[in-house]
Image: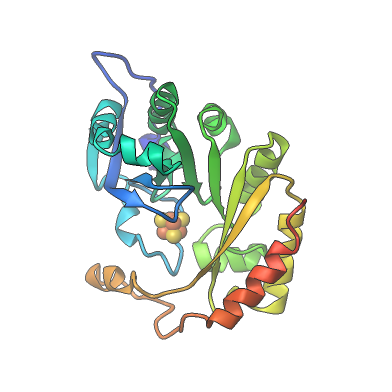
Amino acid sequence: MMQEYQQERGGNMSNPVKGRIHSIETFGTVDGPGIRFIVFMQGCPLRCLYCHNRDTWDPKGGREVTVDEIMEEMQDYIEFIRASGGGITVTGGEPTLQSTFVTELFKRCKEINIHTALDTSGFADIKKVEELLRYTDLVLLDIKHAVNEKHKFLTGVGNDKIRAFALYLSEINKPVWIRYVLIPGYTDGDDDLAAAASFIAELKNVERIDVLPYHSMGEYKWEKLGEKYVLHGVQSPTSEQVKKAREILEGRIAK
Ligand code: SF4
């Protein structure tokens, strides 16, 4: 189903490439440098147990838009974005599922010198995103778990593809910010952190690591859809736990 949804056509004036988005946030401040215009794409091949964007999973949900429409919506904010050293961030869902659309969008942003960030799980076919990456200034890459079986348990998929994607980004020297969600009992064990740290040590393009404390704020979306939230009752980590994880992971960034 995802493949069917993946758009292969390039689009033109009479038949512009279209994408399906969940929503837009106009003043994001945590998904890349400066003030960000954030586009949430619809559709995701992962099934993270803690997903706080559960309503982005359905590739047929959301609304259809053209690149022109997004550029027009962004117009009013460009001045603020530029002044803050910000840019556009495309997230989801999983934005690489609609790589043709996002490539066109980023091309247009680069024409007017807007910084582009791609927020991805890394579950992407490298061949399908090579062009997109040429117009991407920064990748925000989730490392959800470095141990394959645990990754599978948490997200529904193994992490081989994600590792390959991360190593490719390192090979082409694409700037990356790593995101690691710290979930007590699931990703915060000494072994979990050691595995993530050694994987990060293999990469030579990591500019920053964000340890994101788990929170259950998306739980209501699962309830609304009548679905079981497996992590019900799991508490957020303390600031001490976050600090410790950050130290372990940051300690392995290649200088
Ligand atoms: S990759 Fe993101 S959107 Fe997809 S299931 Fe995981 S947390 Fe949700």
Measuring from the top left, give residue 241's x and y in whole percent. Answer: 60, 80
Please state if 156 lies on the left or on the right of 105 as rendered: right
Identity of the residue drawn at 57% across and 29% down = 130
Measuring from the top left, give residue 24's x and y in whole percent. Answer: 28, 47
- Give the number of marks: 0
The answer, for residue 175, to whether it is visible in the render is yes
Figure check: 94 above or below 113: below
Please state if 61 lies on the left or on the right of 35 as rendered: left
Figure check: 110 above or below 227: above
Please state if 137 lies on the left or on the right of 42 as rendered: right
In the rendered view, how is the structure colored?
rainbow
- Residue that extends furthest to the front in the rendered view of this protein: 83
**Would you identify the image quadrant in which residue 232 lies?**
bottom left
Measuring from the top left, give residue 93's x and y in whole percent. Answer: 39, 51
Ligand 1: give its quadrant.
bottom left
Q: Which of 252 and 98 is in front in this view?
A: 252
Identity of the residue drawn at 46% across and 36% down = 116
Measuring from the top left, give residue 148's x and y in whole percent. Answer: 65, 62
Identity of the residue drawn at 48% across and 48% down = 32
Identity of the residue drawn at 34% across and 69% down = 218
**Would you identify the image quadrant in which residue 111 lies?**
top left
Please state if 190 lies on the left or on the right of 4 as rendered: right
The answer, for residue 196, to whether it is visible in the render is no
Q: Which quadrant, please, contains the N terminus? A: top left
